[in-house]
Amino acid sequence: MKALVAALFLTYLLVGGAEAQRADICDVPGYLLFGESELGNVTKSVKEKRRLDIMIFGSASSTLGGPEGKAYPARLEATLKARLPDIEVHITIHAAPRQTVTDMWNELKKIIREQKPALIVWQTGTVDAMRGVEPDEFGSVLNKAVENIQANGTDVVLMNMQYSPRTESMIAVGPYAENMRWVSQQRGVPLFDRLGVMRHWSDTGVFDFYTPTKAFSVAQKVHECIGRALATQIIDAAQLGPMAKVAQ
């Protein structure tokens, strides 16, 4: 029921009730964002400490060349600050390029002990797919890692790989994406289905991912939309809707 209600009000969450009559380029179908998973530690931190510390952990896709502040973590932070104006929001980025999920987990253990964020957004899967790591092994390591992170009082949002129709036939990402979905269901953590979201934008003609381009403006808008959608998912999963302002 929660997911159904959230889906019905998706347009309001992303573009605002007064603007619901017109489509927004960043619109995402509710089934790609909302579920039954909850972010209890985020809820507690926001309501008791009036603070939200998030760490983005993953590949170089969390960064973006050009002017500072245009990549999706910065857009996520800006959106959360706008929608939760009474909450102190801090986002840090820890890039781990060319690392498999096993490599990342070995590094993440130390980071969690030192920083103790309320939430980790964990991007993974692409490098494992490129290197041909056994998908079930990938899923097993990720499952155990998420279990340990939760046991240490930190929430997790899993983020799968980017959609690229030009490399889809060369890199079989499907089994890794499915393992991430399985882990999210097993551990009750949200999955930000970046692969599905970007494929939706491609299929509906919002963005052209087929044509090679160096246009920074396109990449910038994609990151803007991802940041906004991820903020909406976090607010929903942490049940912060009543205290959140409608997105503009």
Image: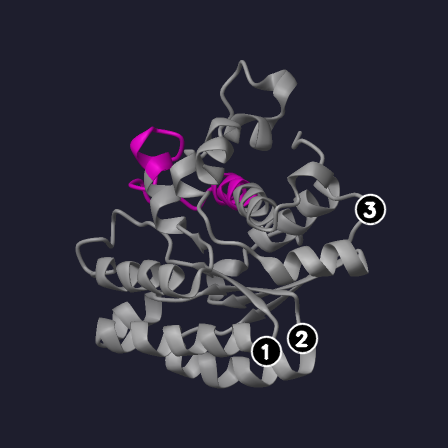
Circle on res. 116: 2
Q: Position of residue 232 (x, y in %)?
A: 57, 42
**Figure quadrant of residue 116:** bottom right
Residue at mark 3: 86
Q: Quadrant of the N terminus?
A: top left
Q: Position of residue 40 (x, y in %)?
A: 61, 59
Identity of the residue drawn at 64% across and 17% down:
18
Q: Mark 2 near mark 3, Cβ–Cβ under 8 Å?
A: no
Seen as rendered, the residue at the extreme top is 21
Circle on res. 152: 1
Q: In screen coordinates, is 239 left or right of 209?
A: right
Is the residue 233 above or below the residue 20 in the image?
A: below
Give the CA distance from mark 2 to mark 3: 22 Å
Q: Position of residue 101 (x, y in %)?
A: 38, 76
Q: Nearer the viewer, residue 243 or 199?
A: 243
Mark 1 residue type: Asn
Q: Earlier in the sequence, mark 3 or mark 1?
A: 3
Mark 3 residue type: Asp
Mark 2 residue type: Lys
Q: Which residues are magenta?
A: 200-226
Circle on res. 220: none
| Front disc: 1 or 2 | 1
Q: In screen coordinates, is 139 left or right of 54?
A: left
